[in-house]
Image: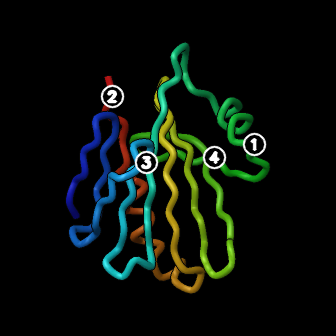
Amino acid sequence: MKKYNHESWSIDIPKNWSVDKSDEDCISFYSPDENRSLHISDYFKEDGHVTEEEVVEMFELESYQPTNLEYLHGICNREEAEDEVILSWWLYLENHLVFAEYICLASEEEKLSGEIESLIYSLRSVHG
């Protein structure tokens, strides 16, 4: 694993994954075979702390589960689209909201559960 440091968050990613910074609002990471990807963006609330209720309303979420990671907490959900699975997390610490989306082939989701957990659990807010 190698640490990727953004100005307001960091994450540990596999050494052989590529990084795409072409979208100014989102950093994307791709596996060598491009069958898996992770996309991360973040936002800062100007006044007060981010709350679960605000995230649910802002992103119009109908189905989600609370999640507490080592460095961040928030909510997550899982969707299937054709032959892919999209796992999404809305994580927050104080006024910092980090959105992460992991996409993989549905047939590989179970096999990749350790990789998914390792990536998401390493995500942390470094603003401040």
Q: Is residue 51 left or right of residue 37?
A: right
Disc 2/disc 4 C-alpha distance (Å): 23 Å
Q: Is residue 16 left or right of residue 42?
A: left
Q: Is residue 35 left or right of residue 10?
A: right
Instruction: Name the front one of labels 1 and 4.
Output: 1
Element at label 4: strand
Element at label 3: strand
Nearest the eye: 126 or 34? 34
Label 2: which residue? 127
* Picture coordinates of residue 32, whole percent (x, y): 31, 78
Kindly identify the amino acid type of the residue bearing the numbered disc 1. Answer: Glu
Label 3: which residue? 26
Element at label 2: loop
Label 4: which residue? 66
* Picture coordinates of residue 13, whole percent (x, y): 29, 61
First in sequence, mark 3 or 1: give its number.
Answer: 3
In the picture, the quarter occupied by the C terminus is top left
Picture residue at 51% right of the left edge, 16% below the top = 46
Q: Which mark is residue 60?
A: 1
